[in-house]
Image: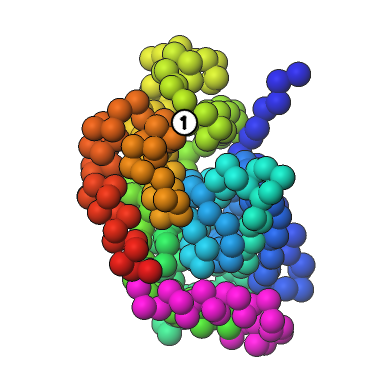
């Protein structure tokens, strides 16, 4: 029987006596299916790497990064292929789940929390923490597993305060709003899972349209409506993000990486890479080495 993956409307198991859930995930790889939940989520990646898909965005993720994910935004931390084998190095994260009424219906309305309220409004765009405060926010996320009661709430408010001051990279466009119903979500999840598994091979539009049980024209319209981009652009972005991982974590040549992530010739790979990253892959690798 064909297995159907749906974007699962997760129910976060939060006690009625607790306003905030701290969740520690440790496994060979992160949860592999598109899902969403009404709670806002802050996640710190302790170990693991791969591609983070959220709303209509996609980018490589690595350890010691922190993300803020808005309410009901479909998302997925998809680990690199090595994490699905017997020798997986393991993936680990700490997440905080809460909603705007966790501390009472008007808590985030008070004047002293105006900047935090604005931050929560922006969370649907999904953000990655950058800049000089990133390390401190990450350390406070780690500390969330070591404190309880009022110390946990104080630490949480410190995280929100730091986030509201931090340099944030917005991953979704301003106009993005989740529009998936259950049927559409199931169909999109099939497409995403197939693409994540086979991105390094040739994928024709007719082929991926068949995965969604749609004609070519129907599929093109469906995918553009729910992701804001064409499937070819999405596929190129996925390949480039995986190329970024290889550029920073391997000694493979540019040519080797080109073919490993699914491009058919080096010139097209370099052109697509420059379009998405603003620099050729060789400069990207060098900038990462310099930064390290």
Q: Which residues are magenta?
A: 131-154
Write down the quadrant of residue 140 in the picture. bottom right
**Residue 117 image point, x, y percent:** 44, 71
Q: Tell me what residue is drawn at x 47 percent, y 31 percent.
A: 199
Tell me the residue that label 1 is attached to.
Answer: 200
Residue 48 visible from this viewpoint:
yes
Q: Tell me what residue is drawn at x 24 percent, y 47 percent.
A: 280
Q: Nearer the viewer, residue 77 or 243?
A: 243
Q: Tell me what residue is drawn at x 24 percent, y 32 percent.
A: 267
Write down the quadrant of residue 193 in the picture. top right
Q: Is residue 96 left or right of residue 217?
A: right
Q: Is residue 8 left or right of residue 287?
A: right
Q: Nearer the viewer, residue 236 or 263?
A: 263
Q: Is residue 168 left or right of residue 72?
A: left
**Residue 236 image point, x, y percent:** 36, 34
Residue 43 visible from this viewpoint:
no
């Amino acid at each position: 029987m064909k297995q159907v993956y749906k974007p699962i409307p997760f129910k976060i198991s939060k006690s009625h006596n607790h306003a905030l859930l701290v969740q520690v995930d440790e496994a060979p790889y992160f949860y592999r299916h598109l899902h969403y939940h009404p709670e806002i989520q802050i996640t710190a990646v302790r170990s693991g790497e791969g591609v983070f898909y959220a709303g209509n965005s996609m980018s490589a993720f690595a350890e010691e990064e922190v993300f803020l994910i808005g309410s009901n935004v479909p998302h997925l931390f998809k680990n690199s292929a090595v994490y699905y084998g017997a020798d997986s190095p393991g993936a680990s994260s700490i997440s905080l789940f809460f909603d705007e009424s966790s501390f009472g219906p008007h808590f985030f309305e008070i004047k002293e929390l105006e900047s935090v309220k604005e931050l929560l409004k922006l969370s649907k765009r999904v953000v990655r923490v950058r800049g000089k405060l990133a390390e401190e926010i990450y350390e406070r996320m780690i500390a969330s597993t070591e404190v309880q009661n009022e110390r946990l709430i104080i630490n949480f408010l410190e995280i929100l305060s730091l986030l509201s001051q931090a340099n944030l990279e917005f991953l979704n466009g301003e106009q993005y709003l989740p529009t998936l119903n259950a049927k559409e979500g199931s169909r999109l999840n099939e497409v995403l899972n197939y693409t994540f598994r086979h991105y390094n091979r040739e994928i024709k539009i007719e082929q991926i349209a068949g995965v969604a049980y749609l004609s070519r024209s129907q599929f093109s319209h469906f995918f553009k409506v729910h992701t804001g981009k064409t499937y070819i652009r999405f596929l190129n972005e996925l390949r480039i993000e995986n190329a970024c991982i290889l550029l920073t974590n391997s000694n493979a040549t540019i040519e080797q990486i080109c073919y490993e992530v699914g491009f058919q010739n080096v010139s097209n790979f370099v052109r697509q890479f420059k379009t998405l990253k603003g620099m050729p892959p060789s400069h990207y690798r060098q900038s990462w080495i310099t930064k390290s």
